[in-house]
Image (cartoon, rainbow, N blue to C red):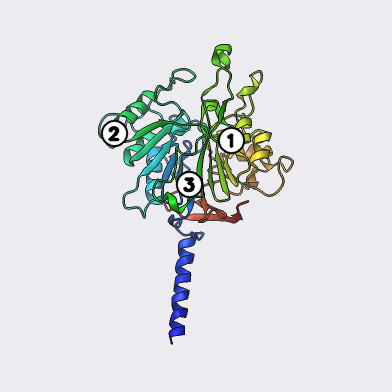
Amino acid sequence: MMKMRYGIVWVALLAMATAAGRAEDVVGQEIAPWQPGMLDIHQISTGRGNSALHVFPDGTTLLVDAGELGQKTPRHTPDRPDGTRPAGEWIARYIRHALRNDPKPSLDYALATHFHDDHMGNASDVLYMSKSGAYKLSGLTRVGDEFRIGKMIDRGWPDYKYPEPVKVGFMENYRAFLKWQAENNGMEVQRFAPGRSDQVVLCRDPKRYPNFEFRNIGVDGEIWTGVGTETRNHFPPLEGVPRADWPHENMCGTSFRLSYGKFDYFNGADIPGVPAEGYPEWHDVETPVAMAVGPVEAAVVDHHGYIDSQNAFLIGVLRPRVWIISVWDAGHPTQRVWQRLQSRRLYPGPREVFATDVHEATRVVIGGIDKLASDRGHIVLRVSPGGGEYRVVIVDDASESHRVTKIFGPYPSR
Ligand SMILES: [Zn+2]
């Protein structure tokens, strides 16, 4: 009698441990909620730029970008789920669903990788104002209006002057947002500090997950050496450089590596690795960044796979199993980038490439693009507790069903 009861208890405990230990995603059903110990990285599909929600093992949240392109052309992919709401609003609603088990969801961190509208939003033709009237709502400012952001990190705070005063149209609006949120919601603003691993940390239950690290790699040409927190300047002093050769916005963007046990992940935003003809070699930012990062399990394709990105060195060094492309244009990816991603000369072994939403024209032009593991949907990287294995879960982006359409893996971390 006693023996049997213990047996039942043991089975029940085992079932609970299994349920707590991993996401039970099923194709055709709503994606399972995040659970403690898991690392989730959601590449959100809107057709208007990048946005990735990260939920760390202790529940700490980080939003990387919240793009909202203004005008669209036939080169661009359609709005997802559709054009009835602005991208920033779709992103906020997606976040609310992803954090649905949190009674008071908030963003502990937000990172603006660089100052372009497909990563931050625009303010030119946007009519929506915040309730306070202090700033317009688009992309990041809309998400930040809906969720409290603890710490906002970007490449320019506090003076936004490198390599020259940032002149994009929405900068004034973004700074009005920072000022209002700092004064009224206690938001802290910091400049991205290259080389450090203590700027983005677990802030809910850090002692439980000592094998988690968020490493800042580079910003504004200042790049981690891989030793301690040491950095070096990849760009020469600007005094000796003709103005036409000065680093452009994408070159100045942030890059980081996220590690959880044996699992490593890379995000280099829109940094280039193939300088335009006639430009200096140091316009290649990917090479020194890749040297610092080393091999990873999964990586976001730099600059959406555009013509100046994903050089052979970076691909050969990172050598991930999983590549993720955030698409909004017919040039995402370009043909040469697609070929390099497939190249077994650059690194051996299998790999899967996932894209949020491939453009019809890209499908026609690029041979073999049908080999994409997935060409449509939100891309959710789900890392199991401890980081030993991970899956890729594709979620329907045609509606807000949050229905799983495909599951890949588990892949072991190396
Ligand atoms: Zn971009």
Asked where in the image residue 296 lies, by quadrant, the reply is top right
Q: Is residue 338 visible?
A: no
Q: Earlier in the sequence, mark 3 or mark 1?
A: 3
What is the number of callouts on the image?
Answer: 3
Question: CB under 8 Å between callouts 1 and 2?
Answer: no
Amino acid carrying mark 2 in the image: Ser
Measure how far apart labels 3 and 2 are at the Cα level: 26 Å
Q: Please, is residue 358 above or below residue 251 in the view? A: below
Does the numbered disc 1 mark a residue whose Cβ is under 8 Å from ligand 1?
Answer: no
Q: Which mark is residue 227?
A: 1
Residue at (33%, 30%) from the top-left corner? 177
Q: Nearer the viewer, residue 142 or 255?
A: 255
Q: Is residue 390 visible?
A: yes
The residue to which callout 2 is attached is 130
The residue to which callout 3 is attached is 42
Find numbered disc 2 in the image and state the secondary structure of the residue it sits on.
loop
Q: Which mark is residue 156?
A: none
Front position among marks 3 and 2: 3
Amino acid carrying mark 3 in the image: His
Q: Earlier in the sequence, mark 3 or mark 2?
A: 3
Residue at (27%, 31%) from the top-left corner? 183
Amino acid carrying mark 1 in the image: Val
Q: Percent x, y for residue 49?
A: 48, 36
Q: Nearer the viewer, residue 358 or 350?
A: 350
